[in-house]
Image: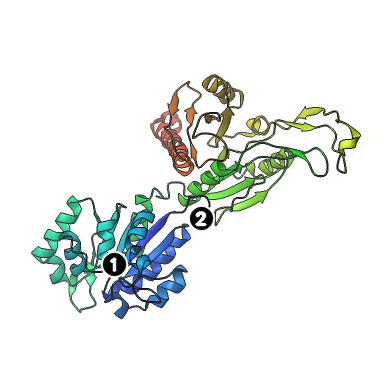
Amino acid sequence: MNFDGLTMRVALGITGGIAAYKAAELLRLLQERGLEVQVVMTRNACQFVAPLTFAALSGQKVITEMFEGPAGPNVDSAIEHIAVAQSIHAMVIVPATANVLAKMAHGIADDFLTTLCLATKAPLIVAPAMNVNMWEHPATQKNLEILRERGVMVLQPDEGYLACGMTGPGRLTSVASIAQAVFETLGLAGDLNGETVLVTAGPTEEALDAVRYLSNRSSGKMGYALAEASRRRGAHVILVSGPTRLDPPAGTEVERVRTAEEMAQAVSRHFERATVILMAAAVADFRPVDVHPGKVKKQSGIPALQLVPTTDILAMIAPRHRPGQIVVGFAAETENLLANAAAKVHEKHLDFIVANNVLQEGAGFDGDTNIVTLVFPSGHCKALGKMSKLDVAHRILGEIIEIRKNAGAKADSAPDTDRANG
């Protein structure tokens, strides 16, 4: 994904082991979840799989040397490891040989990959694969102990028949489990698998004449962040978007609308199959009664503008809100934030509402950050500090997961009336 800083980037390190070919499958799994992958290969890894394979799959240059470039070493190639180190959100090494584990444990940085390990502060995951004797050697086990103490996630290899002909621990763990470790590290654990999330985003536009309209300053970034975060966590996402300049997250079902009425109709069509509804759009509250078919000329004088309310989409869907369906509203306020939000929670029958003061610095329209308070029907409020809109989206989804868990716990603890009466 690459809209307005929401890209998550992973460095995939590949070292010289027979399991290097499995990194291609891992690359595909990471890309399917919208992650951008920068492949870094050691010289020995290139003996097992050609860098061209990973360049074709990732769509990016594969880094194989510390100082490389079309014209030889230059300033850019000299600091490339720092640029990559600062841009990634996680790093995974597949396979991790005994040699690279030893270098990492003792701080040796004699190629791009090991230098990157020292330069980055991103979470580091290693998936070892090697001969059973090498795996069980005290030096290797000590190096693993050192790495674990430093916070490196070590994925235990599987036991079985090895490429060397021996049997025992040392076989690369499954690619699916490696991918899952990366997803969990990035907060993409698939905890919304099976959910269908309906997200509304952006402003609406209500025509005045053929060229003018009433609208607001919403950019759609909060709604798009919710769609991206939901997709990353495994949900099927339906994005109903007003006019924005943003590219929708890959893999989402998108319906573009312009007016409040069009958005209301779209929400109504998709409502029944949605299990979670996130109403983040800034829908116009009023529309003109009459729309001039052409452009109103200045010479015609100042036109009288009569407005009527648009459809209240939350009020429209409230009677259709079925058990188990979670509906979250959003309230952009300029005063009496909590009081107004609390009133809307009960009036619209919401599971909770996300409220922000758009006059507060870092919380207004068109920014990359937000400052919100979650308001619940019980009166409980949870204030979140200033953070990126993607982080806010994940916090909102975390609350939805908690609602699901609590509902499940209540169901499990409820008495079995049939058995009691039987």
Quarter where residue 412 is shown? top left
Render colour scheme:
rainbow
Residue under the image location 48 percent in, 50 percent down: 5
Query: In the orientation shown, which residue stands out farthest toward the front?
Result: 75
Quadrant including the C terminus: top left
Q: CA distance from mark 2 to mark 1?
A: 26 Å
Residue 354 in percent (x, y) is at: 52, 31
Q: Is residue 113 left or right of residue 190?
A: left
Residue 173 in percent (x, y) is at: 28, 64
Residue under the image location 59 percent in, 35 percent down: 322
Q: Is residue 282 above or below residue 95?
A: above
- Tag 1 residue: 112
**How many C-alpha atoms fall within 10 Å of the one at disc 1: few (<14), some, or many (≥20)?**
many
Q: In this figure, what is the number of numbered marks? A: 2
What secondary structure is found at the residue carrying circle 1? helix
Residue under the image location 66 percent in, 44 percent down: 242
Q: Amino acid at mark 1?
A: Phe
What secondary structure is found at the residue carrying circle 2? loop
**How many C-alpha atoms fall within 10 Å of the one at disc 2: few (<14), some, or many (≥20)?**
some
Q: Amino acid at mark 2?
A: Asn
Q: Is residue 269 above or below residue 340?
A: below
Residue 397 in percent (x, y) is at: 46, 40
Looking at marks 2 and 1 on the same chain, the residue that comes earlier in the sequence is marked by 2
